[in-house]
Amino acid sequence: MSFNLTHGTAVVRPASPTTASWAGFPRLLLAESPETGLRRAWCGSLGHNLLEMPWPIWCLLDLAIMCTGVYLGYRSFVWTPQGSWVHFGVVQTCGVQALTFMISGLVFGLYESQTLLRGSRIVARSILVTTTAVASAYVVIYVLMYSIQSRGVLLLAGAFYLCLVPAARLLVCWCVQNYGRKFLIVGTDRRSRLPVEGDGLTRRYQLAGYVTIDPIEIGREVCGRRVLGALEDIEHICREQGIDEVVVGPGAARNPQALERLLGCLRLGCRVTNLSTFCEQVLSEVPLDHLEPDWFLFADLKHYRESQLIIKRVFDVTAATIGLLLTLPFWPLIALLIKLDSPGPVFYHQTRVGLNGRTFRLHKFRSMKTTAEDKGCVWAMRADPRVTRVGRYLRWARLDELPQLWNILIGEMCVVGPRPERPEFVDQLNGELRYYKERHLVKPGLTGWAQINYPYGASVEDARRKLQLDLWYIKHMSLELDLFILLRTPGTVFLGSR
């Protein structure tokens, strides 16, 4: 899934990806042989347009395939000349299956654009979704609805889904990886270089090279890529290299003459944006190296909107109440296991930094030995030797964080937001990372965008990457995004952060 909602920072208003893809078709034929250019244009446009297709459309296509599988299952196993022995109709079955497949797809991240970039990820998540959905449908029909359904119908529907759904996604993956969009960067200074890399960049885009404002730099290499020419020749370079996107570095973005030159790239069908916006859209994080105070001032952050805060508070209270009602019966068992495993209290209370830098008491089930911090506070890490045997399982399933539902109910935390840190770490990170204080513009959360996209942080560099993800969330926060993160969290626990 991709939430590519960009506000404010683009230098030139970009054309839509679809327009850019098809408008670039004549350029490709000029730079390549007709056969190669035609194949690249068609396959590249197909792959990238499907990659950027909204997730509800993918969901509808998947449900259409699933319903077709259910119909074939009824034709094969249920309908006979003498009549049917199954009273649970095809429409009801499609309804139950649609619900279980959609929820399973959201939980395991099948509708994320990142899933479409790796064949192994497509196959693994498709199998998990199918297995979970078919088993869930069987339980719902038999246990909750007290009805009877043919196992053959459910299995055939699942097999039909598993044959066609991964195949369509693997086609997109092949097109994207073999015909990635070509882009160049305008500017050769340190701040014009790509700050991070990931699947979203290396598999979707091919960096053709750099364009310089100073002609003396032509021909040299920047981070292993050649400087292709000067800004005066950018239109010729775009035609010759078959460029789809032009990314403007911070230095060129402040040069009025450079911006005038870049208008010609729009007429060629190229998409033009700045480096910060490019990283936000492709990597779903905000690069700290390219941030200035004006980003926070003009990014149209939603943390101050009263309507947004009311909706978020209602969502938090509802989700926390439901969570407490569902999990409270298990709290005595968790408490008993903690007591039997190691001496000490059941609950652990710790000071954390919340909204606008105010501190509060965070509550957790104790998962570490009582002597864990005798030598002072240290970063939590995977395979932490301070964790108890029971605590290891509690932390893996995130059950140690259930008492934080109380923090949410009383308004100290949200369901979704940046994870709250300890004051000692906040003081350290404020001195080492620019704009770390700005993550406290919103309430901290039980889960968040950084939590589902990045593993446990155990260093300043990890905190930096998570800050970039948190700032992206603060800019794009919405009810839809919160629901997605909440649904995606169980899948992240099972699969790990991508």
Image (cartoon, helix red, strand yellow):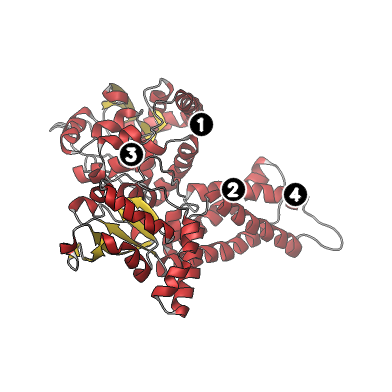
Residue 385, placed above or below residue 118: above
Residue at image mark 2 = 100
Residue at image mark 4 = 88
What residue sits 67% from the left and 60% below the top?
Answer: 69
Q: Amino acid type of disc 2?
A: Thr
Q: Position of residue 424 (x, y in %)?
A: 18, 30
Q: Outermost residue toward the top?
A: 410
Q: Counting other residues with Cα less than 10 Å from the Cα at mark 3, is it few (<14), some (14-19), or many (20 or more)?
A: many
* Label disc, if present, on residue 470 of the rendered structure: 3
Q: Position of residue 89 (x, y in %)?
A: 76, 50
Q: Position of residue 282 (x, y in %)?
A: 38, 52
Q: Earlier in the sequence, mark 1 or mark 3?
A: 1
Local secondary structure at mark 2:
helix
Residue 493 appears in the figure: yes
Local secondary structure at mark 3:
helix
Residue at image mark 1 = 326
* Label disc, if present, on residue 135 of the rendered structure: none
Q: Is residue 406 left or right of residue 49?
A: left
Q: Amino acid type of disc 3?
A: Asp
Q: Amino acid type of disc 4?
A: Phe
Residue 265, placed above or below residue 219: above
Residue 291, placed above or below residue 356: below
- Using the numbered discs, state the Cα–Cα distance from disc 4 to disc 1 in whole angstroms: 29 Å
Which of discs 3 and 2 lies nearer the camera? The answer is 3
Q: Position of residue 495 (x, y in %)?
A: 40, 51
